[in-house]
Image (tube, grey):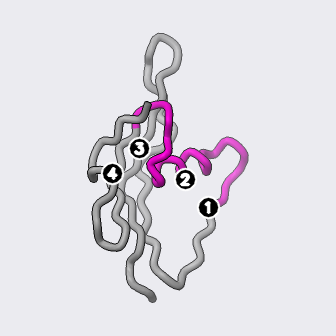
Amino acid sequence: MGRHVYEFRDISYSVAVARNQPKCILAGISATICSGQVLAIMGPSGAGKTTLLDVITLQAYAGRAEVSVWAYGCVCGGGGVVKCH
């Protein structure tokens, strides 16, 4: 197995819905991706695949994400709460 290149832990993501009540979209998602591995993110329509990719690449624009992301051993995005605009 290759060395760890990208890792994320305990992702949660929620958006405000009616009356500003949060709706949880993603919860408790973690993964470690190593060099030399193939990764497939699969699921039915509406399962949150694109949202997951947006959160782990720090591209989520609406809602509130909590994620710790490491790339090549360095913390990206503050390693804590990332407030999305």
Q: Amino acid at mark 4?
A: Gly
Question: Residue tagged by mark 4?
Answer: 77
Q: Residue 77 placed where, x, y %?
A: 33, 51
Q: Quadrant of residue 2?
A: bottom left
Task: Specify few, some or many for label 2: CA neighbours under 10 Å numbering under 14, 14-19, or 20 or more.
Answer: few
Q: Quadrant of the N terminus?
A: bottom left
Query: 46 left or right of 79?
Result: right
Q: Secondary structure at mark 3?
A: strand
Marker disc for residue 41: 1
- Residue at x-position 35% and y-position 43%: 66
Q: Please give the count of numbered marks on the rendered protein.
A: 4
Q: Main secondary structure of the magenta part?
A: loop
4 vs 1, front mark: 4
Mark 3 and 4 residues: CB-CB less than 8 Å, in contact? no
Vertical side of 44 occupied by 82: above or below: above
- Residue at x-position 61% and y-position 48%: 50
Vertical side of 60 occupied by 4: above or below: below
Q: Residue 63 placed where, x, y %?
A: 45, 31
Mark nearer the N terminus (1 vs 3): 3
Distance from the alpha carbon under mark 1 to that under mark 3: 17 Å
Distance from the alpha carbon under mark 3 to that under mark 2: 12 Å
Mark nearer the N terminus (3 vs 4): 3
Q: Amino acid at mark 1?
A: Ile
Mark nearer the N terminus (4 vs 2): 2
Mark nearer the N terminus (1 vs 2): 1
Q: Secondary structure at mark 2?
A: helix
Marker disc for residue 12: 3
Front residue of this view, candidates 7 and 59: 59
- Residue at x-position 72% and y-position 45%: 45
Q: Which residues are magenta?
A: 41-64
Distance from the alpha carbon under mark 3 to that under mark 4: 14 Å
Q: Quadrant of the C terminus?
A: top left
